Image: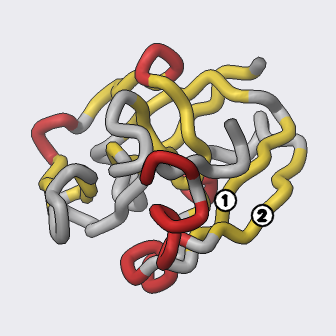
Amino acid sequence: MVLHKGGCHCGRVRFEVLAPARLEVADCNCSICSKSGFLHLIVPKSRFRLLQGEESLTTYTFNTGTAKHLFCATCGIKSFYVPRSHPDGYSVNARCLDPGTVEGIEVKPFDGREWEKQLPEGRGSFPNE
């Protein structure tokens, strides 16, 4: 496990996440992920820490309101959020990690348009768990 750091485009929001050096991430095809190009690195809350910028975050919700899409109010970048599939953790956008600690990224497609139908009990699961 490696401590990766990252953040938004303007630098107001900064975080760190404990994850492998070689990442396995999900490329979801749901409406919001496909439009934003988000690559999901799902981690439990215990492996994520917001370093700065809580006051710069704004929240967007839709549909069930369970997912908390957190955007920097200045630059508009969503570097992480609380996903509906894992409300007890975070999804970090692998594209928002700083260079230097990621040794490689394996991207796996994920059918987010139909995630409730493809998994048991209506609970989503991304491939990096």
- State the image coordinates of residue 107 (x, y, percent, origin top left): 78, 62
* Residue at 55% from the left image edge and 28% from the top image edge: 17
Distance CA(mark 2)–CA(mark 1): 5 Å
**Considering depth in this image, is 99 or 110 the residue closer to the camera?**
110
Q: Report the residue marked by disc 2.
A: 108
- Say if residue 7 shows up in the picture: no
Crowd rating for badge 1 (residues with CA inside 10 Å; few <14, some 14–19, many 20+): many
Q: Secondary structure at mark 2?
A: strand
Residue contact between numbered discs 2 and 1, judged by CB atoms under 8 Å: yes
* Residue at 41% from the left image edge and 31% from the top image edge: 89
- State the image coordinates of residue 38 (x, y, percent, origin top left): 52, 67
In the rendered image, which quarter is residue 98 located in?
Answer: top right
- Say if residue 113 shows up in the picture: yes
Residue 10, above or below 36: above
**Total marks placed:** 2
- Residue reaching furthest to the top: 46
Q: Check disc 2 and give the amino acid type.
A: Lys
Q: Report the residue marked by disc 1.
A: 26
In the rendered image, which quarter is residue 72 located in?
Answer: bottom left
